[in-house]
Amino acid sequence: MRSLRLFLYLLSIFIVPLSINAAKVNHVKWEEGLDFESYLECYGVPETLIDTLDRDDVELISEIVDNRKYYEMIATNGTLLQSLIPIGEEMQLHLFMTPKGYKLEIIPIAYKNDTYIAQLSVKNSPNLDIIKTVKNRRLASEFSRVLKDSVNFRGIQRGDKLAIVYDQKMRLGQPIGMPDIKVAMIETAGEEHYVFKHTDQRYYDEDGKELIKRYMRKPLNHIRITSSFTHRRYHPIQKRWKAHLGTDFGAKRGTPILAVAKGKIIFSGWKGGYGKVIKIKHDDGYVSLYAHQSRIKVKKGAFVSKGDIIGFVGSTGRSTGPHLHFGIYKNGRAINPMRVVKFKTEGLWGSGKRAFINRKDIYKRIITQIIDDNRPSYIWNSIEERSVSPKMKSYYRSLGW
């Protein structure tokens, strides 16, 4: 019913020349290996419709993920009325019929983003206990990831405490995407171990030392950024939503493209608007993507080392000139490459360090309050769901967080 209400709402905005009662809403998975052009062909929609999008939007079409669910409304005669196809976590393709034919646009995914807490005592292991108590496997995975470089998990004992404050997006009552941990703490052997997410979207310990090691190198020897990563933003001039799920580097045609880390080639070939593409699977659930190549040097199934030449810069696909579109994915989710690739030596110093110290102190007070008040965890997929109360939210805001 929720999916039907969603489409009825959209249909109240766009005129559809067929009766709503004569349509069926499907919530299905995107077929593995299916490209958007073939999807249009299945329903007799002209492929030239893609030409109505600009270059960045056309690239996004190549971000449709296999086996991810999408919505479509089909008339009883088989005519496609509408489709909502997710691209990343923030945006979606909206294909819809009008009296003048089909139209295609990229719009934001409607979701609610809120702050939640998890607080518990260890009985088995942090990972298992978060899953059992909070019912959120992704939160357990993310907690282990952000703390693995600062805590010896083998030394954690029964009765040790942990607390997490995190943001989670929800759509139609279900969490979407990875939880965004703002601060996490685990107390073991009487010592508290903290990790803090700063405004630069990186994790630090109490001393301001970066915790997540960036083991990837640059994809080109010489870097010139022409377009940065963004999940979604409203373009003030074009008056519409845009997204760019990677970083573009300007370079001459034929410039060697380098593997950012060791891994296995999981895709080598043509990928819609991205043209000639290579995808490499790395450790810890990371995948790197290199698009618009003029020539590919490695085949699917091959193993490469960090710094190996895998192809050459070009302008294949829907591209206005030679450049490398470079993407990084974590467990299938597009993330900002600047967060995990070591482009230059950085650190916290001066005003940045002072800002971090202030933020750290606020976070620590929040964690202390959660533990002192024995605040209950939000339990996902359960009738016992509890979140941050309005009173606690007011308290957090009074601290400036």
Image (spheres, helix red, strand yellow):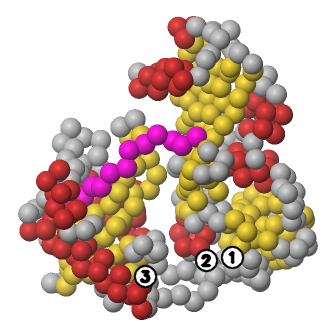
Please indicate, yes or no, whether residue 177 appears anywhere in the rendered image.
yes
State the image coordinates of residue 298 (x, y, percent, origin top left).
83, 67
At 29% across and 41% down in the image, what residue appears? 381
Residue holding disc 3: 211
Please indicate, yes or no, whether residue 25 appears anywhere in the rendered image.
no
- 184 relative position to 316: left or right: left
Give the label on residue 339, or none.
Answer: none
Identified by mark 2, the residue type is: Val
Q: Give the extent of the magenta segment.
A: 107-122
Dot 2 and dot 1 residues touching (CB under 8 Å): yes
**Closer to the N terminus: mark 2 or mark 1?**
1
Which dot, 2 or 1, sits closer to the camera?
2
At 34% across and 75% down in the image, what residue appears? 196
Label 1: few (<14), some (14–19) or many (≥20) C-alpha neighbours in 10 Å: many
Identified by mark 3, the residue type is: Leu
Label 3: few (<14), some (14–19) or many (≥20) C-alpha neighbours in 10 Å: some
Residue holding disc 1: 260
Q: Which of the pair 313/309 is nearer the observer?
A: 313
State the image coordinates of residue 321 (x, y, percent, origin top left).
87, 62
At 21% across and 38% down in the image, what residue appears? 383
Query: From the image, which quarter does the N terminus lie in?
Result: top left
